[in-house]
Image: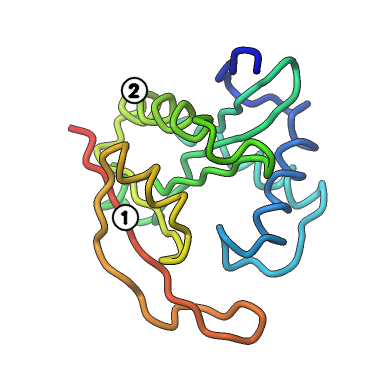
Amino acid sequence: MSEIVIRTAALSDIEDILIIYNEGIVDRIATLETSTKDEQFMFDWFSRHTDRFKVIVADLDGKVVGWASLNQYNSRQAYDGVADLSVYIKREFRGVGIGGKLLSSIEGLAKENDFHKIVLFTFPFNGLGQGLYKKKGFREVGVFHNQGKLDGEFVDVMAMEKILI
C-alpha cells in the first residue's frame, strides 16, 4: 500500500466522504442513522464544519479512504471546549491503521483549536472501533442502554472520552 496522506478535507472530497459515511450506515456498525444520505445532506453537513470544527481525510493515491471530523458537542457555551468526534473508514481499509492516523491528526487539530476534551459515541459491539479508541487513550465513560433503534431493535450506545490537556 502506498503512503496515506492526512489532509484537510476539500469540497471536492464530498462524494467520497458521502460514500464512506453511507457504508457506515449500511453496515450498522457506526451510527444510529438508518437511511443513506445524499450529496445535499453532505454539503449541508460540510458547510457546518467551519472554524474550529475540522474535517480531515485519509488520502491514498488521490482517493479518500477515510475521514474524521470534530463536531459540535453541545451549543451551550459551557461546552465550548468539548468536541464530538466522528471517524469513518472505507470498508476495505478498516483495521489497517488508517483510523489511528486520522485520530492522531484530529487530536492535534482539536488542541490547536482550544478543545480540551473529545467525546465519541460507539456501539458496544464495535470492537474494532473501541480497540482503536482505547489504544489512542480514550476511556469508556458508560453505556446508554436502549439508546436508539436499529432495524426495529433497541441498541446500546457507549460513551468514550479523552482529555487533551
Q: Nearer the viewer, mark 2 or mark 1?
A: 1
Q: Which residue is mark 2?
A: 112
Of residues 89 and 45, the one drawn nearer to the viewer in this rendering: 89
Residue 105 image point, x, y percent: 43, 24
Say above or below: 163 vs 24: above
**Side (left or right) of 43 relative to 114:** right
Q: Which residue is mark 1?
A: 160
Separation (CA) of disc 2 from disc 1: 21 Å
What secondary structure is found at the residue carrying circle 2? helix
Say above or below: 36 vs 109: below
Residue type highlighted by circle 1: Met
Residue 29 image point, x, y percent: 57, 61
Residue 114 image point, x, y percent: 30, 30
Residue type highlighted by circle 2: Glu
Quadrant of the drawing holding the C terminus: top left
Q: Residue at x 31, y 39 (%)?
A: 135
Q: Residue at x 45, y 48 (%)?
A: 72
Of residues 39 and 79, the one drawn nearer to the viewer in this rendering: 39
Query: Which colour style is shown?
Result: rainbow
- Mark 2 is surrounded, within 10 Å at the Cα level, by few (under 14), some (14 to 19) or many (20 or more) other residues, namely few
**Side (left or right) of 113 relative to 51:** left
